[in-house]
Amino acid sequence: MPITIETTVRAPLDRVWAAWNDPHAIEQWNAATPEWHTPRASVDLREGGKFCSRMQARDGSAGFDFEGIYTRIEPQRLIEYVMSDGRAVRVEFIDGADGVTVRESFDAEDAHSAEQQRQGWQAILDNFARHVEARG
């Protein structure tokens, strides 16, 4: 079952795209709660390229690699990838009068409820928007 979330980032499209794909920026915004962080990230932004974000509890009690392979890239418009567990993700960047709408659709997994997944992914997306907007 696909889940779709979105937010509008009040910033220019080039800055939104850059923050989404820059490993150093990802390390700043990629967390659902303050108790988690991303100590390292790597991005090879091309079709067939790999990405990996190490997501980890700040106290070291838990962590995992969020990783996958890019399957489609349309610069400043679309990113599609397949996660290491085979689930597909589509990220759209839609430039508009109020900013850039970032819309993510992802295949749900079985370990957590759809609502838990929606809330977690939305929290990260909202954190991304705050990060980009704070950078002016």
Image: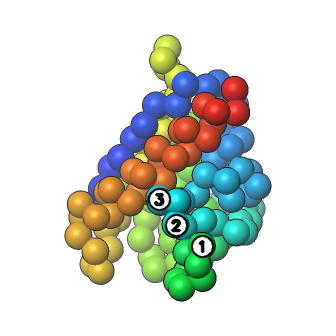
State the mark number for residue 17: none
Q: Position of residue 50 (x, y in %)?
A: 68, 69
Whole-number angstrom distance, CA of label 2 to CA of label 1: 6 Å
Q: Residues within 10 Å of mark 2 (few under 14, many from 20)?
A: few
Does label 2 or label 1 sit earlier along the sequence? Answer: 2
Disc 2 vs disc 1: Cβ atoms closer than 8 Å? yes
Give the side of residue 8 with respect to residue 134, left or right: left
For image coordinates 46% across by 31% down, the residue present is 8
SS type, badge 1:
loop
Q: Position of residue 14 (x, y in %)?
A: 69, 31
SS type, badge 3:
loop
| Residue 45 in sight | no
Q: Name the residue that disc number 2 marks.
A: 35
Q: Amino acid at mark 1?
A: Arg
Q: Name the residue that disc number 3 marks.
A: 32
State the mark number for residue 58: 1
